[in-house]
Amino acid sequence: MRTQSVRVGRHDYQFRRLWDLSQHPGMVQPPNVPWDPAAEYVTPDGDDGTSTISSALWPMFGVLWPAGLALAHMVDRLCLRGARLLEVGCGLALPSVVAHHNGVDVTASDHHPLAAAFLEHNVRINGLRPLRYTPLDFDARASNAERYDVIMASDVLYEPRRAGGVTAFLMDHLNHHATVLVLDPGRKQDGAFGRNMRERGFVVDTSSCALPGDPLGRTGRLVACRRGQPGR
């Protein structure tokens, strides 16, 4: 694993992350990289995800993605004090950590069993108090789930069927007066997601945004959903 420095707003954050998307459980150092016995490595106990997550998808949680960085910059500029905020599919949870640093009541969530250990480590190395984490899966329904004022996510619409699953999940976790912020890096599913949310009474605004550090130079799409008046 390695530590990456990320600047959001006027603050630099340190994030322990996987080396790259070829890393897998038990591979603490990639080939041909000298071993550093003084380094701190995250060694969580229990399930490492290999029993439920394919080898191709396993490392996706452990790197910082351009869409997540774009969402973090957006959260840094928003006034969210007093709102209950949830990040879903958080991965390394940069947007949550930024909100937490800014004094927001935030909970991070993911389905990868190692996300909590990485979050705990990264919150600690940034000198922050513990940040709430809860394991959540888009495919699991929960009629008595906790409700939030704002739910945010980045790059969760990565295949056609996800738009319906994400919408259903949000309906289980949103307060009556709520806002949803989904940042998509151009995977073309934001239109279906927006239609789903309009059908459920939300006013939906879609806008373009930069994706910092995107290797393909893509432009992202922010889907902002707010509860509308009946009939709108």
Image (cartoon, helix red, strand yellow):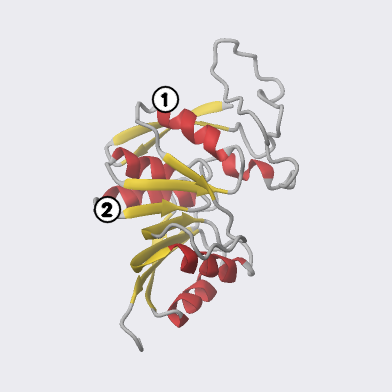
Figure quadrant of residue 203: bottom left
- Whether residue 163 sits left or right of residue 15 in the image: it is right
Residue that appears at 75% across and 43% down: 51
User: Where residue 124 sits: x, y (%)?
Assistant: 41, 27
Q: Amino acid at mark 2?
A: Leu
Residue 4 shows in this picture? no
Q: Is residue 172 above or below residue 20?
A: below
Residue that appears at 49% across and 53% down: 88
- For marks 1 and 2, the one nearer the N-term is 2
Q: Which residue is mark 1?
A: 125
Mark 1: give few (<14), some (14-19) or many (20+) Cα within 10 Å.
few
The residue lying toward the viewer, choosing from 155 and 208, is 155
Residue that appears at 52% across and 69% down: 167
The C terminus - image quarter: bottom left
Q: Could you tell me which secondary element the residue under label 1 belongs to?
A: helix
Q: Is residue 63 above or below residue 161?
A: above
Q: Which of the numbered marks, if any, corresponds to residue 44?
A: none
User: Where residue 200 sits: x, y (%)?
Assistant: 45, 79
Q: Which residue is mark 2?
A: 80
The residue lying toward the viewer, choosing from 114 and 10, is 114
Q: Amino acid at mark 1?
A: Ile
The reply to whether callout 1 and callout 2 are in contact (CB within 8 Å) is: no
**Distance between mark 1 and mark 2 Cα atoms:** 24 Å
Residue that appears at 50% across and 48% down: 109
